[in-house]
Image (cartoon, rainbow, N blue to C red):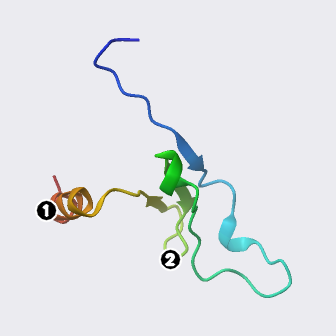
Amino acid sequence: MHMNSRMFSVAGSPRFDVYGNDFGWGKPKKVDVVSIDKSGAFSLAESKKEKGGVEIGIVLEPPVMEAFASLFVKGI
């Protein structure tokens, strides 16, 4: 591994069918992986709204999140 490399970790998978699970109180309306707040990972889940789509979850400090959101909206 190079000195300037960075490792990332992923929580979840789009193949887990999280929106299809029903534990007796109905199917979920929204799914979040809360452990990514402390672990630094990002989460993946299948999209609830679009077949074949993916939801990506990320947790960043507020100023970094604002910069990320601004760039994301611009399509960079």
Q: Is residue 25 left or right of residue 74?
A: right
- Which label number is shown at residue 23? none
The residue to which callout 1 is attached is 74
Q: Is residue 29 left or right of residue 27?
A: left
The image quarter in which residue 29 lies = bottom right
Label 1 SS: helix
Indicate which label's residue lies in the foreground, 1 or 2: 1
Q: Tell me what residue is drawn at x 16 percent, y 52 percent.
A: 76
Up the image or down, 20 lies above or below 68; here it is below
**What amino acid type should be assigned to the residue bearing mark 1?**
Lys
- How crowded pointer 1 is (Cα within 10 Å; few <14, some 14-19, many 20+) is rated as few
**Please, which residue is most extreme toward the bottom here?**
25
The residue to which callout 2 is attached is 49
Up the image or down, 12 lies above or below 23; here it is above
Q: Tell me what residue is drawn at x 52 percent, y 67 percent.
A: 47
**What amino acid type should be assigned to the residue bearing mark 2?**
Lys
| Residue 8 shows in the view | yes
Q: Tell me what residue is drawn at x 56 percent, y 59 percent.
A: 45
**Please, which residue is most extreme toward the top here?**
2
| Residue 43 shows in the view | no
Cα distance in 3D space between marks 1 and 2: 22 Å
Residue 38: image x %, image y %?
A: 51, 51
- How crowded pointer 2 is (Cα within 10 Å; few <14, some 14-19, many 20+) is rated as few
Q: Is residue 75 left or right of residue 50?
A: left
Considering only order in the chain, which callout, 2 or 1, is on the residue closer to the N terminus? Answer: 2
Residue 24: image x %, image y %?
A: 86, 84
Image quarter hosting the N terminus: top left
Residue 36: image x %, image y %?
A: 52, 54
